[in-house]
Structures are given as structure tokens and as C-alpha cells.
Amino acid sequence: MSISTEITRITTARNTIRTKLNELGMVETTANIEDCATAVDGIANRGAVSATVTEGSTYTIPAGYHNGSGTVSGVAGGGDYSLQSKTVTPTKSQQSITPDSGYYGLSDVTVVAIPAVYQDVTSVTATAADVLANKIFVDSTGKNTAGTMVNNGAVSKTLDTTTTSYTVPVGYHSGSGKVSITTETKSATPTKSAQTISATSGKVLKSVSVAAIPVAYQDVTGVTATAANVLENTKFVTSDGTLTDGEMTNIGEINYSMDGLTVTSYSIPTGYTSGGSVSLTNDIETALAAI
């Protein structure tokens, strides 16, 4: 048998006992099981109570349990029967209305309207789902009813980059639970390649500290060289940081000779030269010597 079933069984039994004791005026409708036990324990066992009452006299039956075999009998005789009229107001406890001393009995009892303190419950809108499980309330019909709202106690959950949301379960929460995240701080240094900075498993990034650009990656905004200024088959970085191939032709070593008679000049081609020489042959000397 589950704990919930056992609690319901005990609650039902308590309600039955409490209802009967309330009818007897021994407990209130909100009494707990300990109150009911105390009231039952206080019932005196009177057994068979018997009494004889003379005319004009009264006999107060003692409170307690009576086995039903006792009797109260009167003594025959005439007399003037003086009766009393009484008025009573309903209370939360049962009342026993008896005539005052000097009266033979009651002619009538007027019961006034229920006081405002005992309110009409027809305006109650709470249902079993609105009240904690196994807690008793009075519904709009005046019936004692057990609540069915689940007691979740303290609900806690830690969120991370994988579990990004949490559905709070239906029911009552004690207020001491919490939904939280575990944060961390990371650092990174710029590199020539893109980097993805991810949180450690179970944590959420609070911040990322990015270090200064390393000395190896200098500011190149002052670069003025273009591809035409750099030898072919070599690379350089332009002013926008782009790695670029040089386009300057590598002519290598230049060596040229001319006679000074038929050929008097030489055009050096565009590009890089490693050096060399342009020289005259001895043809011009020979021609001058023949003059």
C-alpha cells in the first residue's frame, strides 16, 4: 500500500470520527486527529443511569456514555407546572437547553438566526485541485473535501549550453528551489586562423578575455608596396593585411656590349637585375686609328 493511499485512508477515518464528535458537540469541524482522540478519551462510561424525579424537580443526566438500559421515572402527583420560554443563539459547540431553577420545564425555545461570523460558504470557489493534497477544506456545499494539488517541495535545476530551458512542474513549490546557471570566464590570444571559444561542459560563458595582438602580427596599415614593387615568386602583406604575390620580373644579370658605331645605346628592360655590365667593343678605337 502506497503512502498516499494510507494517508487518504487515515484521513477518511478521521473525518468520519470528527463528523460524529462534532454532531455530539465535542469537537469543532477543524479538529485534528489528536483533538478527536482527546475528546473520545474524555468520554466517561456511565453504564446504566437510572433516576426518579419528583414533581417540580429536574434531574441532570451526566455527560458520558450510557448503555441504554437506564431509566428516568417520575413520581405521580398533581401540581402547578410552571414552564419557561427561552431564546438561544447558535454556537460552534452543541448546546443543551434546560429550564432555570423554579421552572418545571420549557414552554418553547426560540433559536435565532445563525450569526454573521458563521458565513455562508456558497461563494467558495476553491476546488480540490486548488488545495494541497490531503489538506481539508470546506467546498461551496459545506462538505469537507481533501485537496489534490501536488506538493513539489523545493524544485531545483541547473541550465547549461545543452539544457537551455526547464519546464516547471504543475503544483505547489516551497519557494526554496531555484533554476540556475554555472558561469565561467575564458581567455584567448588572436591567431592567424579564426577561433571558436566554447563553454566547458555544464557551464555558460560569462565573458571571454581576448589578449592583445601578438608582436608577430604587426600593424601593416603603413605598407605602400604593391605587387609591381615586389619580385615575382615572393610574397608580401599589403596595407589591408592581405598576403599577396609579387609581380616584378626578375631579369637576373645583364651583360651587353656595343660597338659605338652602328649601335650606340641599350635599353635596360623593366624589372629587377642582379647586376652586370654594358661595354664598348674596340671597333670605335680601330676606326679612329685608321683616320
Image (cartoon, rainbow, N blue to C red):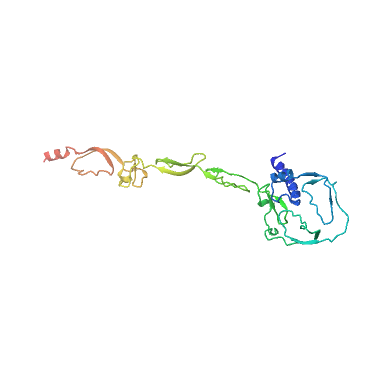
Horizontal and vertical percent for residue 98? 77, 56
- Asked if residue 122 is positioned above or below residue 42 in the image, the reply reads below
* Residue sitting at x 15%, y 40%: 284
Horizontal and vertical percent for residue 33? 70, 45
Q: Nearer the viewer, residue 74 or 49?
A: 74
Residue at the outermost right position: 76
Q: Nearer the viewer, residue 29 or 137?
A: 29
Left or right: where 255 falls relative to 132: left
Specify whether residue 108 is in view: no
Q: Nearer the viewer, residue 179 or 6?
A: 6
**Number of numbered callouts drawn:** 0
* Residue sitting at x 42%, y 40%: 187
Residue 252, image quadrant: top left
Residue 152, image quadrant: top right
Q: Which quadrant of the figure contains the N terminus?
A: top right
Horizontal and vertical percent for residue 85? 78, 62
Horizontal and vertical percent for residue 42? 73, 44
Specify whether residue 33 is in view: yes
Q: Which quadrant of the figure contains the C terminus?
A: top left
Q: Nearer the viewer, residue 193 or 90?
A: 90
